[in-house]
Amino acid sequence: MRILVAGLGLIGGSAAKALKRAGYTADGYDRPEIVRRAVETGVVAAAAVDLSLYEVVFVALPPDAAIEWMKAASFRKDAIVADFCGVKCAPERAIYAQERNFRYVGCHPMAGREVSGLSNAIDTLFDGASMIMVDCAATDADAVQTLEKLYGAMGFAQCKHCTAEYHDQKIAYTSQLAHIVSNAYVKSPTANGFPGFTGGSFQDMTRIAGVDEEIWTRLYMLNREAVESELSCLIGHLQEYLHALRAGDEEGLKVLLRNGRVRKEELDRERKIL
Amino acid sequence: MRILVAGLGLIGGSAAKALKRAGYTADGYDRPEIVRRAVETGVVAAAAVDLSLYEVVFVALPPDAAIEWMKAASFRKDAIVADFCGVKCAPERAIYAQERNFRYVGCHPMAGREVSGLSNAIDTLFDGASMIMVDCAATDADAVQTLEKLYGAMGFAQCKHCTAEYHDQKIAYTSQLAHIVSNAYVKSPTANGFPGFTGGSFQDMTRIAGVDEEIWTRLYMLNREAVESELSCLIGHLQEYLHALRAGDEEGLKVLLRNGRVRKEELDRERKIL
């Protein structure tokens, strides 16, 4: 099977390494200096010259670049093209808005690190992770099956299927909102001098604060309504605690904390079931 | 050295176990059924009968109970009494407001788990952690030295010294605010069905959501102004992202994210230096 990985940053580089670990060979597409480094370090076999050679193409470019590239590229007829963008409605709409000769499957690997680039790519990045695969009426079942086999070989523990709309709603909450909160949390002037004054809560809260603003701004703009709604919901909840504190409403504060604790227990049960 | 641990929950139980691991013996004070269980399982040597026997007393009771108990107890003359409350101004003020024959040192171990009670106590809880020790004009230097030796033996990697006011301000941000954010974060209706839709950000953001509302409500009320100020600061920052999203202000959003990323890098450097 001839495989191409387009975009050899943290995610694409890790995908190429995970494929290699599983016994597959992939070629690479990226800026010349990056592909050269990937070839020299054995991450990919060769630089892609002719895109029409590949049966499977993984697209791990930044969101806008991924969409533009998939729209313009001349893939082999019936090639399986899977993008790894962090939003799924935008690429799906763009791809299906025009004629195509390839089989598109929107995907989103639930894995990452707080560092980026090929030099931080590791072949174990996806071990035990979830891969979200987007289904729509046009999705080809054989393409999905081929990808699921490859994802299993790359270390993913499960493939989760849903629509692009469902994905974007969930991700706005589980990932995009979390990155905003973390990015905002570090802005308090009190943060300086924190070492020695935390047992882990602060680190967990701020681990993902250092987002790449170029990529994340685009991811937010491409899923604006869902993120806006989640952020507005969270601010509303936080304001309830603030009002209780301001009013010295001890009983009210206790109810707010209890509701959150009960809700957390409910979600923990979901985690155990699913 | 005769040591007493008052309050044999997660923190007190772990302190007793860590002392035992280091070769010290401690007696225990708590509700009879809890002390009995602690004695049976070897966590403490015996139930405390006469409080005036002990040279060192660790107080790991809930905040109000700790304060009341320290104010009422008949300790040995010059006993070292160290409480582990999560706020430090309130106990300090209460203790120094009355005559006492003991040497008080307010402390706060920077360690915890998302579970509570003696059954979850472990002798490794404090390994590598920071112990905050509160200094004021009345603090006895020999008492501090004795405690530092014990804390080192219990596994703490460092003892951090500051005033009660400084402690309460830092903790309002690094811990108390983080628990409110986590507790509020889980309240979105979108949270249901999250399994498979996260690579870790959501788990980190919500790990500490399940606070014990009885204890935490009191901790918040005892440090109300500082928590209110931090929460208000965070909500203000979050509103900036919301406004940028609502207005479709892509450049503005990018600046907000960049500022957070730069701030995170600044804090990461502090972590490396200190």
Image (cartoon, coloured by chain):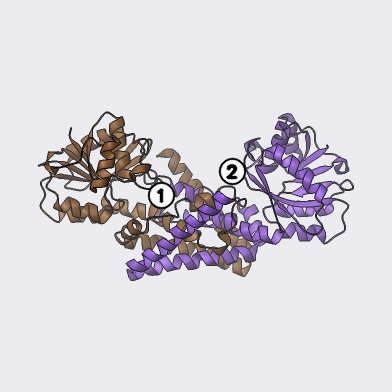
Chain colours: A brown, B purple
Dividing the picture into quadrants, the one containing residue B158 is top right
> What residue is shown at x 23% (from left), y 37% (from top)?
A147
* Disc on res. B113: 2
Say above or below: A186 vs B51. below
- Label 1, secondary structure: give it: loop
> What residue is shown at x 23% (from left), y 54% (from top)?
A65
Whether the residues at callouts 2 and 1 have beta carbons within 8 Å, the answer is no
Q: Quadrant of the C terminus of chain A?
A: top left
* Disc on res. A233: none
Does the image show residue B30? no
Q: Chain of mark 2?
A: B
Q: Nearer the viewer, residue A245 or B145?
A: B145
> What residue is shown at x 67% (from left), y 60% (from top)?
B166
Task: Point out residue B57 in the picture as x, y percentages from the top left corner.
Answer: 79, 44
Does the image show residue B269? yes
Nearer to us: label 2 or label 1: 2
Task: Point out residue B31 in the picture as x, y percentages from the top left corner.
Answer: 75, 42
Q: Quadrant of the N terminus of chain A?
A: top left
> What residue is shown at x 65% (from left), y 57% (from top)?
B219
Q: Amino acid at mark 2?
A: Arg
Say above or below: A262 vs B43. below
Say above or below: B248 vs B116. below
Q: Earlier in the sequence, mark 2 or mark 1?
A: 2
Q: Nearer the viewer, residue A62 or B45?
A: A62
CA distance for labels 2 and 1: 24 Å
Q: Amino acid at mark 1?
A: Asn
Q: Residues within 10 Å of mark 1 (few under 14, many from 20)?
A: some
Mark 1, residue position: B192
Q: Residues within 10 Å of mark 2 (few under 14, many from 20)?
A: some
Q: Chain of mark 1?
A: B
